[in-house]
Image (cartoon, rainbow, N blue to C red):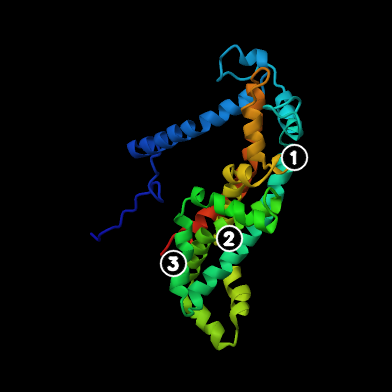
Amino acid sequence: MSDATVTLEGPSGPKPKKYFTRRNLFLYGTLIIISAYYLLPLYVMIVTSLKGMPEIRLGNIFALPSNITFEAWGKAWNGASCTGDDCGPVSRGLRDGFMNSVIITIPSVILSIAIASVNGYALANWRFKGSNMFFTILIFGAFIPYQVMIYPIVLLLGQVGLYTKLGGLIVVHTIFGMPILTLLFRNYFVSIPEELFKAARVDGAGFWGIFFKIMLPMSLPIFVVAIILQVTGIWNDFLFGVIYTKPGNWPMTVQLNNIVNSVQGVKEYNVNMAATILTGIVPLVIYFFSGKLFVRGIAAGAVKG
């Protein structure tokens, strides 16, 4: 008798994965707990801002609003009463502060990133005499406490006529943003294969030709990292805003402080919560739409030495 091959028919393909394993339950359970821990304050802020004061006085901060109202958001944005001891421009709410923050943030971000990207490119690819010393001094500036330089900067801005003006605050944010941004760009450009730079030099490309035609097209992730860091830092700044500007030029964070710390009348927690959300919504939106590129920029060399 000849040997016969027996073929058994049955299911084929990869073995089904078990989703409810001990490892997955621990991993996702931990992530859910951490997410809830960080999202709970935001939930309380949102539901409180949608309630009226009579409902807030009942004391259940976690309960959903029985009657949703956006009156608190209107008060936070336009203002409806005096805040603190000042019944002047501050009483108009966050609207003026928002425009001031936009005027401060946009040029500060553009100037600091433009200068830092060229600095990082030059330090990474165009070694010059004293470049290491220049880089050391520049990075050293990133670790000097801001408080040490507050008074000297006040004197300097006063000498050039920019103290209490938006232009002075733009200069301050641009200068303080350059050290850390230069470090980020320098480390990113170092991670780009050097052969591309050498090939461009052989083809006759110069300093700016290589920068605009080769480096910039490959640097979108690190530019997103820089934009998110700068927008977040400048938009959320309070110290520089309250020191280097005057009431008419106060950014949004200073206006928020005046609204929340008002000592006149009844404490309106719904208005305070709405004002806080409005103040922080710009950095949140930017990160929401560019978060993946931010992670790519970090992973692609933003923190490599």
Give the mark toward the camera: 1 or 2. 1
In the picture of the structure, the residue carrying the numbered disc 1 is 96
Residue 183: tell me if it is visible. yes
Q: Amino acid at mark 2?
A: Phe
In this rendering, would 121 be left or right of 75? left
In the picture of the structure, the residue carrying the numbered disc 2 is 223
Quadrant of residue 55 in the image?
Answer: top right
- Spatial separation of the CA atoms under disc 1 and disc 2: 29 Å
Q: Nearer the viewer, residue 190 or 107?
A: 107
Q: Residues within 10 Å of mark 2 (few under 14, many from 20)?
A: many
**Tags 1 and 2 touching, CB below 8 Å:** no
- Spatial separation of the CA atoms under disc 3 and disc 1: 40 Å
Q: Residues within 10 Å of mark 3 (few under 14, many from 20)?
A: few
Q: What residue lies at 63% left-to-right and 44% top-to-bottom?
A: 241
Q: Residue 189 shows which numbered tag? A: none
In the picture of the structure, the residue carrying the numbered disc 3 is 136
Q: Amino acid at mark 1?
A: Asp
Q: Nearer the viewer, residue 118 or 172?
A: 172
Residue 252, how many percent across, how many down? Answer: 67, 40
In this rendering, would 72 be left or right of 121? right
